[in-house]
Image: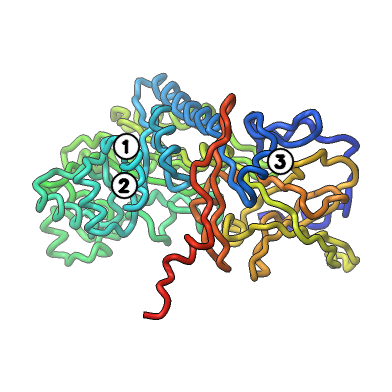
């Protein structure tokens, strides 16, 4: 979220020439300005993209996606190899998933992490081998678990004792052994928005490792004692005991995820230390050797000027060093590690193009009581194609894309066309004073959680997703929705 000081910058500033170099903490090398100042994506001018596909329009660079997928795969593999450890990298499909994206991830050596039966169905349609798919979710249906087992997924991440028992029952009925990992909460509060912080105790994901929470599993003291445990044990310990006692479950290890859009490294290392310590306790307590720990993802990307995302190799090296030291202190072998980058791969791969509509200046009052002016720039999309600002107070920036953004720049707010005052695409940015209806705005870093969260609010149709790549013509990944398609599910009066 932007602080209040951002609001009260000068009303305008002067840019004497077009910014030839886009901010590379936000824009990848797939995006550049040509000699006339127009934005290009993988060598294709945005005006040509609008002419062919219209706006709003998601543009997704295959070039960037593949490069970032390979970067994360290579970074984690090499960093942990220095310590004699092996890793798997899963692309967190919930950030952005199509059949093409699933195949690109697979071709770049990544596995696929799915968070629902629908995502699993799409992964299977993309012909991702079941062994390279993980299924998450805090409330899986019997049908979702059955489909996962029928397709031999590599692991099902169990989120509660109830779900461990549910998986065991279904696997037993099918005559198979389910590969299971237990999601635990390491109690690390990530420095991010509360709605995307997922490792503290008071939220819906995972199983507490705090001593004395065993009774929360819903068992009586007698039932807990029958598992060889006591009321002083943790909920997660109960889940492990139940899983290890089921012939239809192969307990592979532990999973944790501390949140999303995190820049500080400390939280990841603390979570790794806590989960490794808990794994070591389980190994000794139950005389087993759990094979794997998944430390999730959540690595931040640049959305606005001033944010400093860390390079994949920096993240991987620091985590590898921390894991190695913790395991050495515990006297345990480094288990197989897995990681789940999502936004950090897909986010910078995508932008959204809009066409400017109405423009008006609004009087505002600053904190000193002085009158100021802010320009409101309306575009032909909004919260239906990017829900993150209204959900998480997420910040974005925008640039004039179809021509050179030269001259005086005016403090602006980019808003959508929905009937909501909170329908804000970009809260604070500077746009040229001569901006006019029909110009194209580009909002970067929309490759993650924009298409995935899109809706038909106010009965707006969903935009197309267009793939670009170097030395390749743009092509549709996902066809834009027509009004007839949108309305076809309304069956009228029955």
Kindly state the secondary structure of the residue where label 1 is placed.
Answer: loop
Q: Position of residue 428 (x, y in %)?
A: 75, 54
**Gap between marks 1 and 2 measured at Cα:** 16 Å
Between the residue at mark 3 and the residue at mark 1, the CA separation in whole angstroms equals 35 Å
- Residue 127 numbered tag: 1
User: Is label 3 or label 2 in front?
Assistant: 3
Q: Residues within 10 Å of mark 3 (few under 14, many from 20)?
A: some
Return the residue at label 2: 135
First of labels 1, 2 by sequence position:
1
Residue 283's x, y, as percent?
Answer: 22, 39
Q: Are marks 3 and 1 in contact (CB under 8 Å)?
A: no
Q: Percent position (x, y) of residue 1? A: 65, 55
- Front residue of 147 and 484: 484
Q: Earlier in the sequence, mark 3 or mark 1?
A: 3
**Which residue occupies the foreground of this view, 311 or 445?**
445
Mark 2: give few (<14), some (14-19) or many (20+) Cα within 10 Å: many
Q: Quadrant of the C terminus?
A: bottom left
Q: Residues within 10 Å of mark 1 (few under 14, many from 20)?
A: few
Q: Which residue is mark 3?
A: 47
Q: Is residue 399 left or right of residue 63?
A: right
Task: Evaluate whether residue 419 shows in this view.
Answer: yes
- How many marks on residues? 3
């Amino acid at each position: 979220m932007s602080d209040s000081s951002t609001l009260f910058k000068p009303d305008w500033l002067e840019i004497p020439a077009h910014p030839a170099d886009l901010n590379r903490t936000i824009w990848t090398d797939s995006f550049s300005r040509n000699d006339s100042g127009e934005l290009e994506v993988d060598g294709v001018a945005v005006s040509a993209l609008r002419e062919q596909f219209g706006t709003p329009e998601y543009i997704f660079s295959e070039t960037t996606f593949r490069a970032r997928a390979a970067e994360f795969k290579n970074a984690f593999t090499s960093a942990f190899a220095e310590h004699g450890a092996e890793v798997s990298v899963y692309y967190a499909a919930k950030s952005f998933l199509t059949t093409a994206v699933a195949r690109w991830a697979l071709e770049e050596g990544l596995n696929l992490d799915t968070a629902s039966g629908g995502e699993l169905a799409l992964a299977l349609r993309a012909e991702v081998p079941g062994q390279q798919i993980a299924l998450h979710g805090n409330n899986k249906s019997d049908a979702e678990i059955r489909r996962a087992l029928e397709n031999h997924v590599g692991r099902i991440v169990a989120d509660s004792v109830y779900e461990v028992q549910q998986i065991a029952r279904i696997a037993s009925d099918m005559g198979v052994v389910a590969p299971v990992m237990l999601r635990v909460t390491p109690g690390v509060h990530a420095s991010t928005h509360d709605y995307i912080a997922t490792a503290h105790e008071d939220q819906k994901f995972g199983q507490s490792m705090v001593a004395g929470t065993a009774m929360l599993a819903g068992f009586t003291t007698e039932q807990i004692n029958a598992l060889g445990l006591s009321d002083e044990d943790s909920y997660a310990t109960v889940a492990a005991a139940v899983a290890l006692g089921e012939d239809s479950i192969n307990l592979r290890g532990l999973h944790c995820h501390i949140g999303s859009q995190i820049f500080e490294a400390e939280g990841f290392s603390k979570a790794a230390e806590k989960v490794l310590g808990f794994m070591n306790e389980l190994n000794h307590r139950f005389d087993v050797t759990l094979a794997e720990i998944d430390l999730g993802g959540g690595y931040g990307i640049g959305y606005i000027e001033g944010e400093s995302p860390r390079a994949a190799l920096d993240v991987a090296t620091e985590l590898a060093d921390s894991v190695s030291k913790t395991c050495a202190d515990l006297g345990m072998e480094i288990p197989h590690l897995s990681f789940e980058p999502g936004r950090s791969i897909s986010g910078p791969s995508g932008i959204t193009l809009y066409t400017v509509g109405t423009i008006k200046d609004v009087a505002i009052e600053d904190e000193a009581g002085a009158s100021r002016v802010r320009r409101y720039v309306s575009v032909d999309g909004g919260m239906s194609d990017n829900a993150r600002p209204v959900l998480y107070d997420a910040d974005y920036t925008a640039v004039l894309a179809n021509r050179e953004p030269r001259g005086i720049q005016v403090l602006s707010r980019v808003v959508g066309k929905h009937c909501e005052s909170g329908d804000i695409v970009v809260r604070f940015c500077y746009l040229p004073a001569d901006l006019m209806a029909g110009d194209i705005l580009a909002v970067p870093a929309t490759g993650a959680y924009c298409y995935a969260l899109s809706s038909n609010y106010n009965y707006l149709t969903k935009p197309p997703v267009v793939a670009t790549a170097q030395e390749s013509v743009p092509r549709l990944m996902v066809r834009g929705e027509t009004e007839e398609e949108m309305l076809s599910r309304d069956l009228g009066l029955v």
